[in-house]
Image (spheres, grey):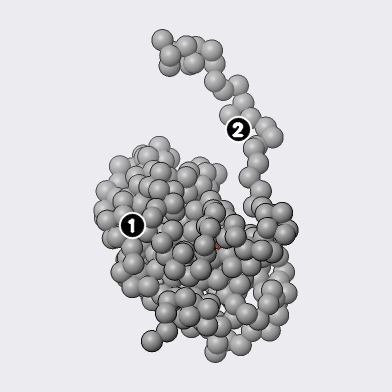
Amino acid sequence: MATLQEQFNKEGFLILRGALDKEVINAIYREAREIFAVQIKRVTGQTVDIDDRDVFENAMFEFFEKDFDAFVNTGKTVQHSISLHRLGVSDQILDLLWQVGISQPVIGARPAMQFNSRFLSKGGSKHWKLDAHQDWRTGQGSLDSTVIWFPMVNAGEEIGALQVIPGSHTVGLLESSTSGYQGGITAALREEEFVQTEFEVGDLLIFSSFLVHRSGNNVTHNIRWSVQLRYNNLDEPTFIERGYPMAYLYKPETELVTPGFPTVEQLKSLYE
Ligand SMILES: O=C(O)CCC(=O)C(=O)O
């Protein structure tokens, strides 16, 4: 019987059933919806029940249509939630990384959350689905940099769970039209090599950042809520040799987002 590490090394990924505590996932999912609900109320005037999936998601679509900037910013804010970050550095996740050989994990990029739906897209499929890519190109970290992906709702083919090419983590860094997330691998890939993954809440996919993968096709009216956590290995010799490159750039806005804000009165009334 192959060990987890042997299977991971051979296929470039593992799907671990029931590896995550459902309550932890539900808390992250809940916090995300609660954050969105505040802005949905502000923008659409609706007080939505976050547990009524269809009603809540229709309100998400309306929010997206009515105030795109606020939607994008709320999406980013959700990715800064405490519950999500807490999971990213939890013993459970670190233990998993150790099991696949990441001896000294360090965060490769902030945790990310995706709200995958064609109704949350302005640019056709290119804005809600990722073409075939290798995450290493965007992170450029350790050779063994590793991604953990899991949905917060049950996710199979219909709702567009990830599709992966087993064993593709050793074919090298493939030619790509971009190092960002719009665009993808331009080298020829055989369609029949993609394998559709399927998950229940609590299952996760852990994969080498060289594994070729892409978004599935969400044909439902629901949002596929999912999370990605990315790690490098501080012990990996080429990462050390290359000076621990950090290819993710976080930078501040150059202009004030809300000109004229705040007034002195606003500040005083806050602290008095
Ligand atoms: O969740 C998805 O649809 C795509 C996520 C992905 O491929 C990535 O972030 O690298």
Q: Earlier in the sequence, mark 1 or mark 2?
A: 1
Question: Where does the image place residue 24, in percent across and percent down from the top left?
Answer: 31, 54
Tell me which corner region of the image, top left, top right, bottom left or bottom right, holds residue 183: bottom right
Residue 180 found in image quarter: bottom right
Identify which residue, 53 or 231, lies in the foreground: 231
Residue at mark 1 to residue at mark 2: CA–CA distance:
32 Å
In the image, 156 versus 171, the foreground residue is: 171
Quadrant where the C terminus lies? Answer: top left
- Disc 1 under 8 Å from ligand 1? The reply is no
Residue 151 placement, left or right of 238 = left
Q: Which residue is mark 2?
A: 257
The answer, for residue 126, to whether it is visible in the render is no
Q: Is residue 266 visible?
A: yes
Residue displayed at 43% across by 16% down: 270
In the image, 267: left or right of 251? left
The amino acid sitting under disc 1 is Ile
**Residue drawn 43% across and 76% down?**
4
Q: Residues within 10 Å of mark 1 (few under 14, many from 20)?
A: many
Label 2 element class = loop
- Residue 25: give its label: 1
